[in-house]
Image: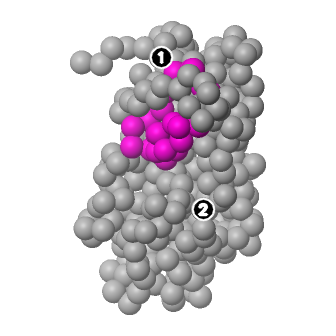
Amino acid sequence: MKRHLPAVALAAVAALALAGCGSDPAAAPKAAPVGIQPEQDVLSGVQKNEAAAALLPADVRAAGTIKLGGAVGSPPGAYYPEGKKELAGLDVDLVDAVAKVLGVRVQREDAAFETILPALGSGKYDVGTGNFGVTEARLKTIDFVTYIDDGQGFAVRSDNTALNAVTDLVQLCGLTIGTGAGTTFEATLNAKKDVCAQAGKKPYEVKSFSDNSAVVTGLQQGRLDVVMSTINGLRYQAAQPGAKTRFLGEYHLLDVGFAFKKGSALTPAFQAAVNQLIKDGTYRKILAKWGTADSAITESKINPPEHP
């Protein structure tokens, strides 16, 4: 049985439980999220675009459905509002908007973050969502259609004044860092552990958790010095009343996109749909609704290289 968390920790859990890091639907915040307008209707005016729909494979047009595996976490990505059975969030609105543009219905299945990309290869899903960052490693087996810029960032407790913007991992030497298991954050930290030895400093320690609540409670209780997660998630967390965390800014920008198996014929249609939403202004409205306007892109791309 899961232990119930106090309100402050629960608000913080919600922020770090973004789908891109794995998630727990039970960790949805109890209070109205800060900086977002979850009840706002931004999709009613979206119309089917025949040119974009024509790019769909013939069998998909005939079936009229697309199978999606989506991770569930917290605002602003994808979450279950308290007392409701329907998903909400940036990823949800973008998927629904793309479906309207393409004239298809989405058959969504909630899935654990770490299972989605392998399931694309097996054909279980046609597309996956979960704040998946575009990395060179993932591009070897996955195709992406980008829809926002997000990336990697750090946060500390608000009473920690010793650490500010992290521009080099050497700044973390000697500290204990918490992050999600199986994420790009864990991979980045583990791949660069030798920077401290090269600088003649004590190495940092990485503690990875499959349960995101453990990351946040570790920070709150002082067992972790710093946490690494998504930029949007950490921004949201820092804006929560009583969360008492401080966002240290962007460390590494990543494009975020819809994920497909390598060679999927769906990518041109999805790209055209996202670009149509950008063109007609729906995209801007969706991002404003979820407080992520700073993550806007000007054009959707297929498989862009990872940001340096």
Disc nearest the viewer among 2 and 1: 2
Residue 176 within the segment the image draws in magenta:
yes
Residue 168 in the image: state x and y as whole percent: 68, 37
In three-dimensional space, the C-alpha distance between marks 2 and 1, rounded to whole angstroms, equals 31 Å
Q: State yes or no: residue 88 in magenta.
A: no
Amino acid at pointer 1 = Gly
User: What residue does disc 2 label?
Assistant: 306
Q: Residue at x 62, y 48 (%)?
A: 151
Is 12 drawn above or below residue 109 in the view shown? above
Where are the magenta residues, as a range? 172-195
Residue 113 spot, x, y in % from top left: 38, 47
Is 282 left, or right, of 90 in this rendering? Answer: right
Quadrant, the C terminus: bottom right
Number of marks in the rendered image? 2
Residue 188 vs 199, above or below: the answer is below
> Residue 218, which numbered label?
1
Q: Are marks 2 and 1 in contact (CB under 8 Å)?
A: no
Q: Is residue 112 left or right of residue 305?
A: left
Residue at 55% in and 71% down: 303
Give SS at disc 2.
Answer: loop
Q: Is residue 176 visible?
A: yes
Q: Is residue 25 visible?
A: no
Secondary structure, mark 1, is helix
Q: Nearer the viewer, residue 29 or 50?
A: 29
**Residue 263 drawn above or below residue 242:** below
Local crowd at mark 1 within 10 Å, few (<14), some, or many (≥20)?
some
